[in-house]
Amino acid sequence: MTISTGDTLPDATLLQLGAEGPEKVSIAERTKGRKVVIFAVPGAFTPTCHSAHVPSFIRTKAEFDGKGVDEIICVSVNDPFVMKAWGESTGATDAGITMLADPESTFTKAIGLDFTAPPAGLMARSQRYAMLVDDGKVTVLNLEESPGTCDVSAGEGLLAAL
C-alpha cells in the first residue's frame, strides 16, 4: 500500500554515519512531536538527484525554517557511508540537511514508494518525493511521476504546497 496524505509513517530504522560509525535512526522517534520534511531520491550522486533535488532543499532551507520545520531529511537507498560523502560533496550537510540511508529499502518499501529500473542499474530504489510530516503524520505528499524529473518534489514545489 502506498502512503498518502493523512497516514501515519510506519516505524522503520534508517542509518546515519556518526563519529563511531553507522547509527540507527528510528523515523517514528525522529518525527514524534516535530514538523519534518522528508524527501527521497532514487540514488546518491545520480544526475537529477545531485544537480537538482538536493540543491533545491539547500536553497530553500531558510524558508522551511521560517515555516517552523524542525528538520529536513534526505533519504536514499544507499549505505550510510555514501550518504555522508554525498552530503559533504553537495553542501547539504553544511546547510543542515540530515542525510539518512535506507540500505535495504525497508522504509521505502514500507511506505510503498519503491521501484526497480534494471536498465539504469537501480534496484529496489525510492521514487522521488517530498513530504511534510507533522508529529508522524503525512500532511503533504508530493510524488513525482517520473524518477528523472524534479518539480513537485523540489524544495520550491513542496513550499508551494504548504
Image (spheres, rainbow, N blue to C red):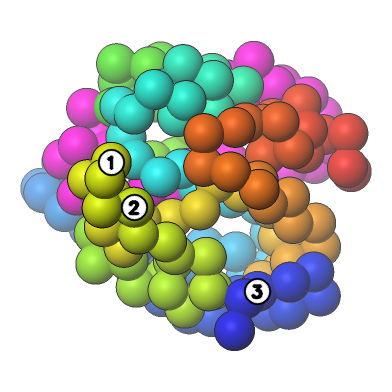
Quadrant holding the N terminus:
bottom right
Q: Position of residue 142 (x, y in %)?
A: 73, 50
- Mark 2 surroundings: few (<14), some (14-19) or many (≥20) residues within 10 A: few
The CA span between labels 3 and 2 is 21 Å
How far, Cα to Cα, is label 1 from label 2?
Answer: 6 Å
Q: Nearer the viewer, mark 3 or mark 2?
A: 2
Pick the residue in front: 154 or 134: 154
- Give yes or no for contact between labels 1 and 2 (Cβ–Cβ under 8 Å): yes
Q: Label 3's element?
A: loop
Q: Residues in magenta?
A: 57-85
Going from N to C along the chain, the mark reached first, 3 or 2, is 3
Q: Which residue is painted at 45% across and 29% down in the image?
A: 49
- The kind of secondary structure element at disc 2 is strand
Residue 51: % across, % down: 46, 16
Q: Quadrant of residue 3?
A: bottom right
Quarter containing the C terminus: top right
Q: CA distance from mark 3 to mark 1?
A: 25 Å
Residue 52 lies within the magenta run: no
Q: Which residue is mark 3?
A: 3
Front-most of 76 and 122? 122
Q: Are marks 3 and 1 in contact (CB under 8 Å)?
A: no
* Relative to 46, 52 lies left or right: right
Q: Secondary structure at mark 1?
A: helix
The residue singled out by tag 1 in the image is: 120
Label 3 sits on what residue type?
Ile
Q: 96 or 43, which lies in front?
A: 43
Q: Residue at x 28, y 41 (%)?
A: 120
Amino acid type, label 1: Ala
Rendering coords of residue 15 (x, y %): 27, 57
